Image (tube, coloured by chain):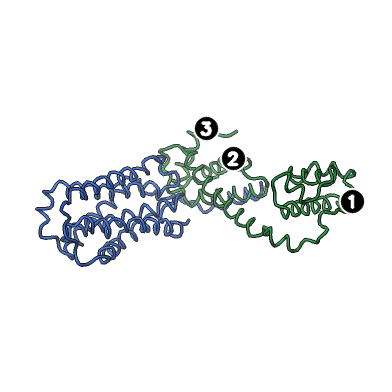
């Protein structure tokens, strides 16, 4: 059961005087109410655990800045939000670094990239589970028979972008079907 | 949960009684006291302008100095709050310097209008900005050092505000030392560089206030 805010402040005041049991209880209670906050913002459970541990370390480092005279949760959430922003910044920077430039990918695509090596009807169930744009592109190309150029004109994308989306969709489908 | 329990156990093992950080008010009062002493010592070294008493009877000069001192005070207050992760739960107070700067721009605009005919500018120019920057070094270093003992979660904003506060201390000192009545010179070489200084502070804050 999560304690009320008043108890958390008293626990912190006790912890600041060296009461280790109060400090341990406080950290456990803090982890309890921070976990749902982080779970809503991060998809992977491992990431939630890692970040939660990092936040507890930050709370430990910054505990001298909390005197128990003001509400505890805003202080904790300020630290949690700060570390979450740091984490997301690093995460998206990594994503950008590993993202392939559209132009580079276009240069490496084979000419017949829009041809698939399986029949569309047999895998339409898996296609519907793809991201919406990829599913729409494959449906237009295989159900309605449009070329990549025609699909691009219809949905307002560049032809190269349509080819890349199709290529990525086939890659995902191959991985799914090979499992 | 095992990893979490291990982490908690390790933190608890490391947790002795802690010396609490001073409240933002105490921190601010310390900074203000040091700023006053620093300005006095700087004026003893640089010398006070010979017409200081005459100028202090001028309403525009008095208003300019008053608002400049208010900028020193409010930026230091903002920095003292920004040193805490939750801004001591007084986040709106950290924005007070914005209002002071708006008032400052108004006062300077009035001073510019009142300076008619324009007073002749001094021979020197960028030397004033350099002097203010040098004067600002020690206050900036002291404030950054104080803030590193705490835990700011708005490092860029805090850095910008610290540099504005330190630069304003330098600006107050030079304004009481340099014998010029040219408001155009003062705007160009004393006050406009604050923009660059604030940006430098944003960069410094991100690096120096890590924890």
State which quadrant residue B203 falls in.
bottom left
Q: For the residues labelled 2 and 1, say whether their Cβ atoms are less than 8 Å apart.
A: no
Q: Give the residue number, with chain letter if any, for mark 1.
A: A118
Badge nearest the viewer, 2 or 3: 2
Q: For the residues labelled 3 and 1, say whether their Cβ atoms are less than 8 Å apart.
A: no
Q: Give the residue number, with chain letter if any, for mark 2.
A: A37
Q: Give the residue number, with chain letter if any, for mark 3.
A: A4
Q: Which chain is blue?
A: B
Residue at horizontal 42 percent and vertical 59 percent from the top: B204
Per the rendering, the colour in which chain A appears is green
**Mark 1 packing: few (<14 Cα in 10 Å), some, or many (20+)?**
few
Q: Nearer the viewer, residue A136 or A126?
A: A136
Residue B45: assigned label: none
User: Distance from label 2 to label 1 (Cα)?
Assistant: 43 Å
Earlier residue among tags 2 and 1:
2
User: Distance from label 3 to label 1 (Cα)?
Assistant: 59 Å
Report whether A92 appears left or right of A15. Answer: right
Residue at horizontal 36 percent and vertical 41 percent from the top: B93
State which quadrant residue B139 falls in.
bottom left
Earlier residue among tags 3 and 1:
3
Marks 2 and 1 share the same chain? yes
């Amino acid at each position: 059961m999560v304690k009320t805010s008043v108890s958390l402040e008293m626990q912190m005041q006790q912890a600041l005087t060296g009461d280790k049991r109060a400090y341990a209880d406080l950290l456990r209670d803090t982890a309890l109410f921070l976990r749902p906050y982080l779970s809503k913002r991060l998809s992977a459970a491992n990431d939630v655990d890692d970040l939660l541990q990092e936040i507890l370390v930050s709370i430990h480092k910054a505990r001298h800045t909390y005197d128990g005279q003001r509400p505890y949760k805003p202080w904790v959430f300020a630290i949690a939000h700060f570390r979450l922003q740091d984490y997301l910044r690093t995460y998206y920077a990594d994503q950008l670094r590993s993202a392939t430039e559209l132009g580079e990918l276009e240069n490496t695509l084979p000419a017949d990239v829009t041809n698939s090596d399986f029949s569309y009807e047999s895998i339409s169930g898996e296609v519907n589970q793809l991201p919406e744009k990829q599913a729409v592109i494959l449906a237009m190309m295989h159900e309605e028979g449009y070329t990549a150029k025609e699909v691009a004109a219809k949905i307002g994308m560049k032809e190269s972008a349509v080819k890349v989306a199709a290529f990525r969709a086939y890659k995902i489908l191959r991985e799914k079907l090979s499992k | 949960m095992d990893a979490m329990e291990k982490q908690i156990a390790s933190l608890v093992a490391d947790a002795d009684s802690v010396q609490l950080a001073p409240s933002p008010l105490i921190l601010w009062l310390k900074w203000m006291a040091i700023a006053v002493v620093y300005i006095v010592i700087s004026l003893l070294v640089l010398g006070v302008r010979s017409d200081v008493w005459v100028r202090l009877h001028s309403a525009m000069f008095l208003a300019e100095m008053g608002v400049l001192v208010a900028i020193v005070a409010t930026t230091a207050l903002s920095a003292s709050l920004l040193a805490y992760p939750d801004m001591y739960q007084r986040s709106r107070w950290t924005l007070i310097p914005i209002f002071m700067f708006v008032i400052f721009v108004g006062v300077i605009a009035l001073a510019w209008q009142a300076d008619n005919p324009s007073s002749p500018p001094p021979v020197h120019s960028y030397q004033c900005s350099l002097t203010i920057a040098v004067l600002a070094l020690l206050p900036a270093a002291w404030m950054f050092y104080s803030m590193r003992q705490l835990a700011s979660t708005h490092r860029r904003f805090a850095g910008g505000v610290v540099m504005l506060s330190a630069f304003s201390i330098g600006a107050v000192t030079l304004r009481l030392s340099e014998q010029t009545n040219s408001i155009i010179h003062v705007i160009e070489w004393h006050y406009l560089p604050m923009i660059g200084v604030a940006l430098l502070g944003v960069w410094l804050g991100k690096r120096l206030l890590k924890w």
